[in-house]
Amino acid sequence: MSIDIMAALVEYQAYGYYLLLTFLVVILYWYIFHLYKSEKSGRRDYEQYGKIALEDNILDEPVESMPIKQSKIEQQKRGATK
């Protein structure tokens, strides 16, 4: 009886492995498609991120400029003074 259970568990393990592998392949291809689509539409230029490995000095220009956001404390202070 225990041999039958072990055989069934091994079979289920094989199905689980196949499903997990298929799921990971689908996620990988979706991610590659997402990167390609983002670069084609002009939202991001992923080639410029390759410069990070070459220009990694602290004084180098950043790859992307980020908008300066106010901290929540400063926003609360301004809201209280208005």
Image (spheres, rainbow, N blue to C red):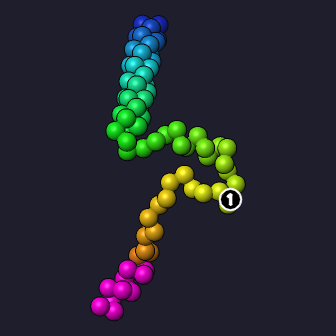
Quadrant into which the N terminus falls: top left
Q: Label 1: few (<14), some or many (≥20) within 10 Å? A: few
- Hey, which quadrant is residue 62 in on the image? bottom right
Predominant SS of the magenta segment:
helix
| Along the viewing direction, whichever of 25 and 11 lies nearer the viewer | 25
With respect to residue 65, does 42 lie above or below? above
Q: Which residues are magenta?
A: 73-82
Quadrant into which the C terminus falls: bottom left
User: Horizontally, is 31 left or right of 59 in the view?
Assistant: left
| Along the viewing direction, whichever of 8 and 48 lies nearer the viewer | 48
Q: Residue at x 41, y 37 (%)?
A: 39
Residue 12 screen position, x and y as percent: 40, 15
| Residue 30 visible in rendering | yes
Residue 51 screen position, x and y as percent: 61, 44
In reply to whether residue 75 is colored magenta, the answer given is yes
Q: Amino acid at mark 1?
A: Ile
